[in-house]
Amino acid sequence: MRRALLAITGLAAGTTALVVLKGAPGASQVAQELPAGVPAGTPARTDPAAPGAASERAAAPTRPTGRPDATASRTPGAGRTTTGGGTGTRSTPAAPRTSTAAPKSTNRKITGPVVVTEFGNVQVQITVAGTRIVNAVALELPQGGQSDLRSNRVDDAYSGTSGTVVRQQDANLDTVSQATATSNGYRQSLQAALDQVR
């Protein structure tokens, strides 16, 4: 039991002496006296034949590698800030979510009345954003025989997002050639729809 106590006391005294010597001004001189090719922090080797070499090896513990924080950097969780008893890392609260819903459309669809012509019925529907016309659609046009041809010409000229109605923004449309009755019916239904907007 006494031998164990003596060994522990000797080891503690050796470690204290090593710490004191490490901070002493002559400590850097040891690193300069090492042979070429030996990295700094390697323990100095003594000649085994030199007197007292065995006792020096037994009394002095091995020197650290020259990096005092080497063991600390390998310790799991070193440098982490913990909360709640030190069992987990601190996390920052999540950023508040912003709404990604698209704004509601302000477009309105307004349907004009059915206008009866000698060749058939005509009805127009317009889409407006505020007071601006953004689209025009013929819901009803005369059908059958030559009426199909006339109706197609009127629809192609007036309707759509790039038709004459959207470009002019009113019902003052030029009459489509050979489709006077259908053109007039389209303009009347369109004007009645525009009157609901304004």
Image (spheres, rainbow, N blue to C red):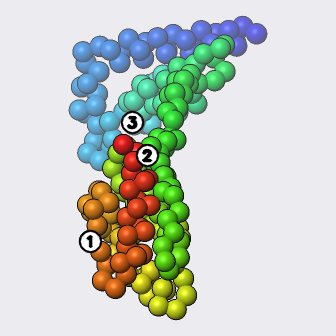
Q: Amino acid at mark 2?
A: Gln
Numbered tag placed on residue 59 in the rendering: none
Question: Which residue is tagged 1?
Answer: 174
> Could you tell me if residue 43 is visible in this image?
no
Describe the element under mark 1 as helix, strand or loop. loop
Q: Are marks 3 and 1 in contact (CB under 8 Å)?
A: no
CA distance for labels 2 and 3? 95 Å
Q: Nearer the viewer, residue 109 or 11?
A: 109
**Point 23% across, 32% down: residue:** 32
Q: Residues within 10 Å of mark 3 (few under 14, many from 20)?
A: some
Q: Quadrant of residue 180?
A: bottom left
Return the x and y of residue 16 as percentages of the image width and height: 46, 11
- Which one is earlier in the sequence, the residue at label 3 or at label 1? 3
Q: What quarter of the picture does the N terminus occupy?
A: top right
Mark sitting earlier along the chain (2/3): 3
Q: Are marks 2 and 3 in contact (CB under 8 Å)?
A: no
Residue of label 3 = 42
- What's the residue at 28%, 31% (across, down)? 31
Label 1 vs label 2: CA separation?
A: 22 Å
Residue occupied by mark 2: 196
Position of 105 compared to 87: left or right?
Answer: left
User: Residue 196 appears at what percent x and percent y?
Assistant: 43, 46
